[in-house]
């Protein structure tokens, strides 16, 4: 097989230009056709539509098993403040690194077209990673994806919690399951001057929120990880009116199925019990968004071995972030590789921040991670079967 790394290096200038175009003209979840078409034009060759606005491109052997390399197409509803010349001005922003992932994957794909691959390489341009109705679920449900015989799936994601040069590639759980919480407290509204004639759902909801935030510290083993965040509160229409209801939404993140089940029960009990103590009725709907992202042990180890001795240093990294890549890991041997972006001198902001725009040099590091995952999949999954 040709030296893919050398071929990829020759594609980096084109990848940088592509990254700038994608970053300047981003698309929200479900509206990624333009982004997908730009990538397909850059990669070349036939492409099939999948998951409505996603694309599949196969390189190398047209039959038999394939190693899947996945990148995400969508951006976020943020007004960019990065100050880079190629910043978006549309109120939509690639603030999670998807522009870098896509540009790097395009470079790898273009190089692969000039290489003699020992197995099929399936490029997956996935839509709707940032959306609750996950694009990964639709990809897995599509017979066209299964027809390519995906033997392993490789994902790469930028990670500001890691230093530049570090790469997180740990076996087992590396990202949390995510569950969406919708809470409603119903009381008896009335005039703000006569609170004794009401059952105040605003006060009850405030106490519910405080009580929920104690669950992790008092119901979860300190050696396990969980995060509960209430991100939205809605109540009332005027300062002198006690409303009849109040609502909140949040997200529960867990890495252990047992902890997840216990916290689901505790959330329901807390919402109902605390609201009742204030004369109100509390209800919660828990929607499971993502499962735990579980890196295949042999694939993660082989990927780390491919990285060892190179410019990137494998390290252990796990977080309570959530990613719909977890749906692939639940069905197919998969590895998510986290590429560090933190630079103390630059003081780069984190993901989903309006100033997040890591330097173009990070593209080559993401390419190296994709290549390590591909070679790791050959060693640990394809050749081992």
Image (spheres, rainbow, N blue to C red):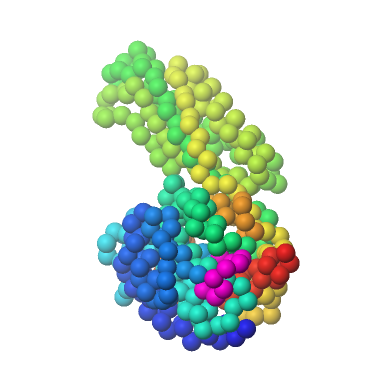
Q: Is residue 126 above or below residue 17?
A: above
Is any part of residue 45 visible from this angle? yes
Is any part of residue 369 visible from this angle? no
> Which image quarter: residue 318?
bottom right
Q: Could you tell me residue 144's position as x and y percent?
A: 49, 58
Q: Is residue 61 magenta?
A: yes
- In depth, the one of 374 and 101 nearer the eye is 374
- In depth, the one of 27 and 124 nearer the eye is 124
Q: Which region is colored magenta? A: 59-68
**Residue at image location 35% in from the left, 71% down from the top:** 38
- In depth, the one of 134 and 193 nearer the eye is 134
**Residue at image location 44% in from the left, 19% down from the top:** 280
> Which image quarter: residue 55?
bottom left
Q: Is residue 298 magenta?
A: no
**Residue at image location 52% in from the left, 40% down from the top:** 288
Q: Is residue 345 above or below residue 234?
A: below
Q: Could you tell me residue 264's position as x and y percent?
A: 58, 34
């Amino acid at each position: 097989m040709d030296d893919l790394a050398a071929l990829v290096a020759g594609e980096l200038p084109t990848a940088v230009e592509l990254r700038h175009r994608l970053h300047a003209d981003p698309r929200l979840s479900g509206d990624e056709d333009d982004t997908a078409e730009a990538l397909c034009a850059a990669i070349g060759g036939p492409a099939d539509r999948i998951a409505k606005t996603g694309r599949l491109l196969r390189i190398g052997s047209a039959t038999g098993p394939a190693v899947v390399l996945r990148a995400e197409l969508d951006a976020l509803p943020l007004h960019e403040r990065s100050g880079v010349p190629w910043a978006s001005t549309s109120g939509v922003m690639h603030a999670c690194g998807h522009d870098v992932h896509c540009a790097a994957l395009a470079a790898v794909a273009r190089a692969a077209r000039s290489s003699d691959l020992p197995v099929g390489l399936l490029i997956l341009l996935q839509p709707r990673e940032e959306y609750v109705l996950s694009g990964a679920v639709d990809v897995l449900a599509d017979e066209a994806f299964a027809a390519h015989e995906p033997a392993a799936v490789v994902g790469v994601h930028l990670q500001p919690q890691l230093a530049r040069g570090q790469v997180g590639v740990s076996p087992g759980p590396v990202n949390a399951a995510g569950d969406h919480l919708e809470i409603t407290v119903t009381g008896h509204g009335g005039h703000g001057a006569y609170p004794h004639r009401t059952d105040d759902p605003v006060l009850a909801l405030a106490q519910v929120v405080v009580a929920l935030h104690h669950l992790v510290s008092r119901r979860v083993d300190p050696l396990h990880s969980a995060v509960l965040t209430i991100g939205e509160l809605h109540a009332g229409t005027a300062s002198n009116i006690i409303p009849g209801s109040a609502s909140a939404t949040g997200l529960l993140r867990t890495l252990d199925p047992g902890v997840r089940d216990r916290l689901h029960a505790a959330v329901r009990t807390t919402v109902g019990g605390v609201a009742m103590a204030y004369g109100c009725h509390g209800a919660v709907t828990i929607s499971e968004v993502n499962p735990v992202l579980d890196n295949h042990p042999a694939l993660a180890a082989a990927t780390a071995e491919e990285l060892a001795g190179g410019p990137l240093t494998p390290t252990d990294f796990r977080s309570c972030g959530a990613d719909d890549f977890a749906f692939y890991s639940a069905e197919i041997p998969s590895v998510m590789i986290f590429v560090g972006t933190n630079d103390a001198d630059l003081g780069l902001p984190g993901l989903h921040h309006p100033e997040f725009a890591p330097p173009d040099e990070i593209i080559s590091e993401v390419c190296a991670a994709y290549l390590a995952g591909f070679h790791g999949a050959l060693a640990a999954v394809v050749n081992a079967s």
